[in-house]
Image (cartoon, helix red, strand yellow):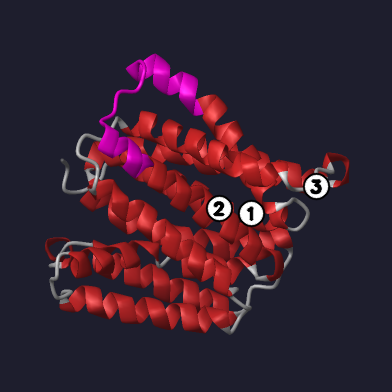
Amino acid sequence: MNRHPPLFAILLLSLGMIAAGSVVVATKLAAQSMPPFTAAALRYGLAAAVLLPWAWWRHGPPRMERGDGLVLLAQAALGSLGFSVLLLLGLRDGAAAPASVAAGTLPLLVLAGACLARRRRPSPRLAAACVLAALGVTVAGEGGAIHPLVFAAIACEAGFVSLDRVMRRPPPALMLSALLCLGGLLLTLPGAATETWRPAAWPISAWLALLWHGLVGTVAGFVCWYSGTARVGAAAAAPFTALFPLTGVVAAPLVLGVPLDHALAGGGALVAGAIVLAAVPLSAVKP
């Protein structure tokens, strides 16, 4: 792996994380008019329709051990019923930009959770990064209310990511993403069947947000992120997750028309700095 990421990998990683960070704003648009389970099912169905044929063509039919299949089902539940639906519910009344800042703490939650699971004391840098991130979320909260369900959604996503380490023989990344989208679709369909469908009443902005979430945030974000990670390694890619909260802070005023105040900008910068502090190796910051 290259110690310094090449320019093309930097572009891929940046685009991948910007695409992922934009889904909070897209979710806000969809949540304002679409029922939560319906919106989640449509998003997963759209992504699965693209990823499943692609994964089948690249890798053939999926082969998984029974235990890994149960882990994948748990991940699908945490990602669809947990993160997606709770985020949709939380953003109905909550602001998108502060939620993006809060969601940007996800990498730190995963790192801290891994330390606790292994019964290891967090390093001083990780502890300082967690404090800095908590301060950033607190500051961002002054710029708009962060709904409690948003924090619940982030906790579910942290559990989702942490389960990656439990699989004994995980499938290739493309197949894994396709199967997770299929699982998300199957798990959200029962809830969607109980909701009232009024597609004619949904504004074009909600449909465009749904298309963006499924095709850009999920499919394109996956392709760019994993292609960049394959070129430079996970350690070198980790600092680019700082773009997640910054994307939401910048996109919310542009797309939703909400004002960008100093609290949101400062909170986003603090969370981004916390991610870089925790992710960049010491060797990379020495003169």
Instruction: Name which of mark 1 and mark 2 comes first in the sequence.
Output: 1
* Residue 127 x, y percent position in the rendering: 24, 78
* Residue 120 x, y percent position in the rendering: 13, 71
Instruction: Name which of mark 3 and mark 1 comes first in the sequence.
Output: 1
**Which residue is disc 1 drawn over?**
27
Residue range of the region highlighted in magenta in the rendering: 51-72
Q: Main secondary structure of the magenta part?
A: helix
The image quarter in which residue 88 lies: bottom right
Distance from the alpha carbon under mark 3 to that under mark 1: 19 Å
265 up-or-down from 28: above or below: below
Q: Identify which residue is drawn at 17% across, 42% down.
A: 2
Kind of residue at disc 1 = Thr
* Residue 164 x, y percent position in the rendering: 29, 47
In terms of secondary structure, where does tag 2 sit?
Answer: helix
Mark 2 surroundings: few (<14), some (14-19) or many (≥20) residues within 10 A = many
Distance from the alpha carbon under mark 3 to that under mark 2: 19 Å
Task: Name the mark on residue 84.
Answer: 2
Mark 1 and mark 2 residues within 8 Å of each other at the beta carbon: yes
279 up-or-down from 9: above or below: below
In terms of secondary structure, where does tag 1 sit?
Answer: helix
* Residue 91 x, y percent position in the rendering: 65, 64
In terms of secondary structure, where does tag 3 sit?
Answer: loop
Check if residue 71 falls in the magenta segment: yes
